[in-house]
Amino acid sequence: MYTVLPVLGAALGWGLTRIAEWVTGLSWFPFQGLFELFLRLPDAVELIAGIALGTAVGLFFAVWIANEMLTVTVGRDAIRLKRGDFEQEVARADVASVFVEDKLLVVLGHRRQELAQVHFDLDRDRLAEALRRHGYGRLSDGDPYGDRFKRWVPGADGLPRGADALLKARGHALEKSDESDLRELREELAGLDVVVRDRDKKQYWRLADPA
């Protein structure tokens, strides 16, 4: 990313003169004055400015993409997850199992509670090797408690007090694909020992073991 995107940006910047000439021929296009000012520059300055601008734009997108990518750091003492503004650390002593299913990386605790969940788009084999090397055991093929989930409907029996309202609010967030609200409500449900999964805009739940 830090090589290809700046090079592509520089190539686009090199062709900025032709782009500017084309844009100035479109009376409806905004920022006509900026493009006309660019075309008034000496040819050598125009070329250098175009390449520099294109390189800077390419570097900006490389930094932005890298920041939005998931980083999983597996150490002897903890697993650290980071993507954009989201960052979480799970202590090694708290981890019972780790699995990847439906493009999700999930860390479970010893009470079968969910300690972490994040969208996973990395190399599964490398993650499995890192877990094995640092003593976390093998990467599970799927959720070992997947058969315990029930589809949530309002007023479902067996939910602790307050969980139904949280699931209802989370259902609205799920319809709007509001990732921030979904994560916050998932954490509140985890505090009630409720584990939740999403499938086709539907919520499924199970309970963790009591403390």
Image (cartoon, grey):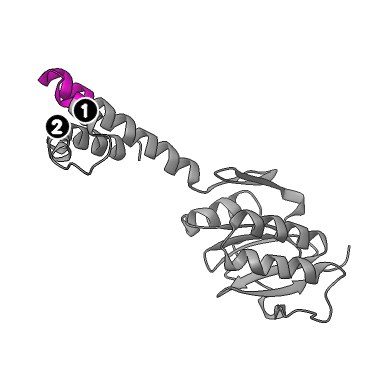
Q: Which mark is residue 93?
A: none
Displayed quadrant of residue 87: top right
Residue occupied by mark 1:
50
Return the x and y of residue 23 as percentages of the image width and height.
Answer: 17, 39
Q: Left or right? Give the position of 107 relative to 31.
A: right
Whether residue 91 appears in magenta in the rendering, the answer is no
Q: Nearer the viewer, residue 82 or 60?
A: 60
Q: Which residue is painted at 66% across and 52% down in the image? A: 135
Displayed quadrant of residue 15: top left
Residue occupied by mark 2:
17
Return the x and y of residue 57 as percentages of the image width and height.
Answer: 33, 34
Quarter of the image with the N terminus is top left
- Residue 207 appears in view: yes
Tag 2 secondary structure:
helix
Few, some or many C-alpha atoms within 10 Å of disc 1 (few <14, some 14-19, many ≥20)? many
Q: Are marks 1 and 2 in contact (CB under 8 Å)?
A: yes
- Residue 208 appears in view: no
Residues in magenta? 37-50
